[in-house]
Image (cartoon, rainbow, N blue to C red):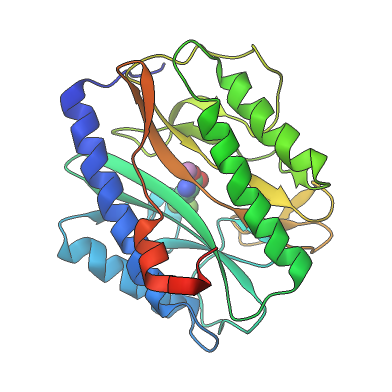
Amino acid sequence: MIYLKTPDEIEKMRRACDLVSQVMGEVAKQVAPGVTTRHLDSVAREYMLAHGGKPACLGYGGFPGTLCIEVNETVVHGFPSGYCLREGDIVGIDTVVELDGFNGDMCYTFMVGDVADDVRRLCVETKNSLYKGIEACKPGNRIGDISNAVQTYVERRGYTVVREMCGHGIGRKMHEDPEVPNYGRRGTGPLIKNGMCLCIEPMINLGSKNVVIESDGWTCRTRDRKPSAHYEHTLAVHDGGTEVLTTFDYIAEALGDRFI
Ligand code: MF3
Ligand code: CO
């Protein structure tokens, strides 16, 4: 069941999305070699709580963190831990804030210090593919148009698309219908309509597309242990167009010329 949002509800989505974007800006200030992912998690949780938000991942299905931490070969849903970030790592940080009953969801993959060229390029092209998906998200198109735009862009560049996890609708719940896969055929899937709020989140691998879930039941990593990148925005379709509700601007401000 797809819930179409009213303008008032979209305004609440806008606020939740601005808060989650600020949270990511705060986290961005802290990402550096030697910092533990648990430290990033507490920075995020405290910022959310101080601004009236609820860390929506914490306790979700038993998930133990505010942030999902995705170091190198981790694709999604890694736990915050005592792991110290190292020069050359990439770390995807994915989080959701609930504010006034609505959820904002975003992910950004950060580079820790200098990163190998091929891995840096994976990050840049994964982020580009997110914007290709966003361009294809407009009323009258179908979800498969988004999926196909992402897939075509990354596969032409030699990367692979994770199949097991998808983008999704969002609103009062973190995950609502429809699913938004990062692979698929143009002209298929649900029609995109005014009032839809969607998360587009390409999860793109440098090596093969295959993933495994670790024995903790959550941490998803590439089977070949090659790196994976992940970027996500929350969008609202309204008045015949698409508004990107989350922003990487706070991250850009925090990183300065290190922003990619
Ligand atoms: N953005 C992530 C997702 O859509 C958030 C997961 S929160 C978790 O899957 F609690 F499930 F980890
Ligand atoms: Co999401």
Residue 55 visible in the picture: no
Which quarter of the figure has residue 157?
top right
* 28 w.r.t. 194: above or below: below
Looking at the image, the residue that sits furthest to the front is: 257
* 141 w.r.t. 89: above or below: above
Residue 39 visible in the picture: yes
Which quarter of the figure has residue 11?
top left
Image location of residue 141, percent across then percent down: 53, 14
Please name whichever residue, 11 or 58, is drawn nearer the observer in this view of the structure: 11
Q: Quadrant of the N terminus?
A: top left
What residue is rendered at 43% in x and 62% in y? 67
Image location of residue 66, percent across then percent down: 38, 62
Image location of residue 158, percent across then percent down: 84, 47
Image location of residue 259, percent across then percent down: 50, 67
* 24 w.r.t. 186: above or below: below
Please name whichever residue, 255 or 162, is drawn nearer the observer in this view of the structure: 255
What residue is rendered at 63% in x and 84% in y? 87
What residue is rendered at 41% in x and 64% in y? 252
What residue is rendered at 59% in x and 27% in y? 146
- Tag count in the figure? 0
Answer with left or right where residue 63 lies relative to residue 130.
Answer: left
Please name whichever residue, 13 or 78, is drawn nearer the observer in this view of the structure: 13
Q: Quadrant of the C terminus?
A: bottom right
* 8 w.r.t. 211: above or below: above
